[in-house]
Amino acid sequence: SQQGEEDPQALSIQEGENATMNCSYKTSINNLQWYRQNSGRGLVHLILIRSNEREKHSGRLRVTLDTSKKSSSLLITASRAADTASYFCATDPGDKIIFGKGTRLHILP
Amino acid sequence: SAVISQKPSRDICQRGTSLTIQCQVDSQVTMMFWYRQQPGQSLTLIATANQGSEATYESGFVIDKFPISRPNLTFSTLTVSNMSPEDSSIYLCSVDDNTEAFFGQGTRLTVV
C-alpha cells in the first residue's frame, strides 16, 4: 500500500520558475526521502530529511518536514529543462521504504 | 553505497509462463526489497526478502504468485508466476543503508 501522497500529480512551469511539490504520509517515520526518476530510467536519490529536522537544503533543492502534519515539501528553485522528471517522496514505516504516487514535473522552455 | 546488478534487463514472455529475476548486491545486506512499477505509476513494494526466512509480502501480493528466494546475504530472486498481461511492468530490487535506497537497473517485463 502507498504511504505517501504527492500533490500535485502533474506540474508544468516555465524554465527559471520555482517548482513546489508536496507529500503527505500516514504513519510515524524516521526519515523522509525524495527521489527523482527520469523517463524510463532508474531512481536517483535527491535528499533525506530526518524526523527531527524541519528544513534541509542541497543546491537548488529545499526540503521541509512537518511531522505534526505528516507532510513534506520539495522546492526546486530556478528550474531547468533537465529537471523534467517524476519526483517521489519515500518514507520508512518500519524496515521498509514506501514510495508516494509521485509528481510529474515538466519544465517548459 | 551499494551496487546492484539485476537481470534480465527486459523480457517478453508468453502468458501462463513464469520469469525469474535475479538480483546481486556487491555487499552483504540483511534485507532486500522487491518493487513493481507499472507504466506511469509509482513504485509499489511487493515484499521484503530476509536471508534465512520467508519473505514478507505486502497487501495484495502473495507467495504463490511472486515466490522469492534469498539464499545468501548478497543475492535474491523474484519469480513472476503464471503471468498475464496485467503483470507487464518494471520490477526492481533494492537495498538501503538507512539513509538511501539503492536500486537495480530494473527488469522491464512484457507479457503477451
Image (tube, coloured by chain):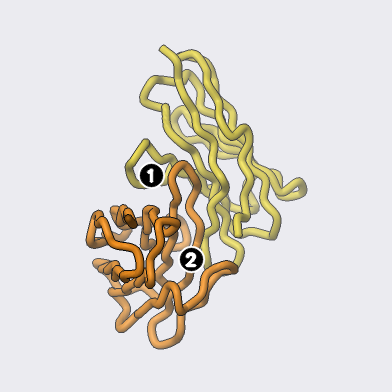
Chain colours: A yellow, B orange
Residue shown at 57% from the left, 37% from the top: A63
Q: Is residue A91 above or below residue A60?
A: below
Note whether A17 is above or below A106 in the view shown: above
| Residue at horizontal 59 percent and vertical 34 percent from the top | A9
Q: Percent x, y for residue B89? A: 39, 53
Relative horizontal placement of residue A51, taking residue A37 as reference (left or right): right
Chain assignment, label 1: A
Left or right of A94: which side holds B1? Answer: left
Under circle 1, the secondary element is strand
Looking at the picture, which amino acid does disc 2 mark?
Answer: Ile
Taking A64 as reference, is B75 above or below it? below
Q: Secondary structure at mark 2?
A: strand
Q: Residue furthest right?
A: A68
Q: Which mark is drawn over residue B46? A: 2
- Residue B47 relative to residue B79: left or right: right
Q: Which mark is residue B24?
A: none
On whether disc 2 and disc 1 are found on a single subunit, the reply is: no
Residue A11 in the image: state x and y as whole percent: 55, 26
Place of residue A51 in the rendered image (x, y in percent of width and height, measured from the top left): 63, 53
How packed mark 1 is, by other alpha carbons closer than 10 Å (few <14, some 14-19, many 20 or more), is some
Judged by depth in the image, the label closer to the viewer, 2 or 1, is 2
Q: Chain of mark 2?
A: B
The foreground one among B96 and B54 is B54
| Gap between marks 2 and 1 measured at Cα | 20 Å
Return the mark for residue A44: 1
Q: Which residue is drawn at the image coordinates 57% and 35% (left, top)?
A: A74
Question: As shown in the figure, which amino acid type bears the numbered disc 1?
Answer: Val
